[in-house]
Amino acid sequence: METPTNDSTATTHYTLHLALNSNAITPMIDGMLQPLHLLFFLLLLAFGLLTVVAWWRILAKTGNPGPLGLLMWVPVLNVALLFWLAFSQWPIERRAGPLEKPKFCPNCGTAVIPS
């Protein structure tokens, strides 16, 4: 059995150093993950657009301007819009007038449907 010479020991040491050095591995990992970055970005963009479309439709159905749904991308304004939508009187409610309170049966407490 031969003993390793200085050159082969140095080569082995350098190879081991490259394998353990994160700076040498990082470009290889980045190259492998690059398609995943694009996929993640496209999924995130699709989800963001779907969210804005959903809020646009919700706001339009309440009688408010649909473009207010774009505010759901703005960090503080999205929470303010949600609370404003929850606690304000909607334009569609103002046009329709107050809702009738349901009538209940005095004996059993169930709602009575007018015929």
Image: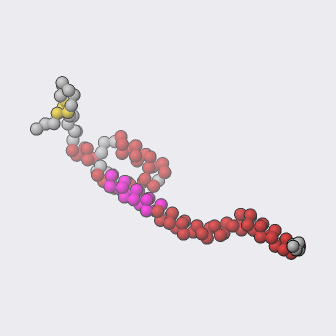
The picture quadrant where one finds residue 83 is top left
42 sits to left or right of 58: right
Q: Nearest the camera: 79 or 111?
A: 111
Residue at the spot 45% in from the left edge and 49% down from the top edge: 77
How is this picture coloured? secondary structure
The picture quadrant where one finds residue 2 is bottom right
Q: Image height check: is 80 above or below 67? A: above
Residue at the spot 75% in from the left edge and 68% down from the top edge: 18
Q: Residue furthest front?
A: 1
The C terminus sits in image quarter: top left
| 86 is within the stretch colored magenta | no
Q: Image height check: is 22 above or below 92? A: below
The picture quadrant where one finds residue 111 is top left
Q: Image height check: is 43 above or below 79? A: below
The N terminus sits in image quarter: bottom right
Q: Residue furthest left?
A: 115
Q: Which residues are magenta?
A: 44-59
Q: Position of residue 71 (x, y in %)?
A: 42, 54
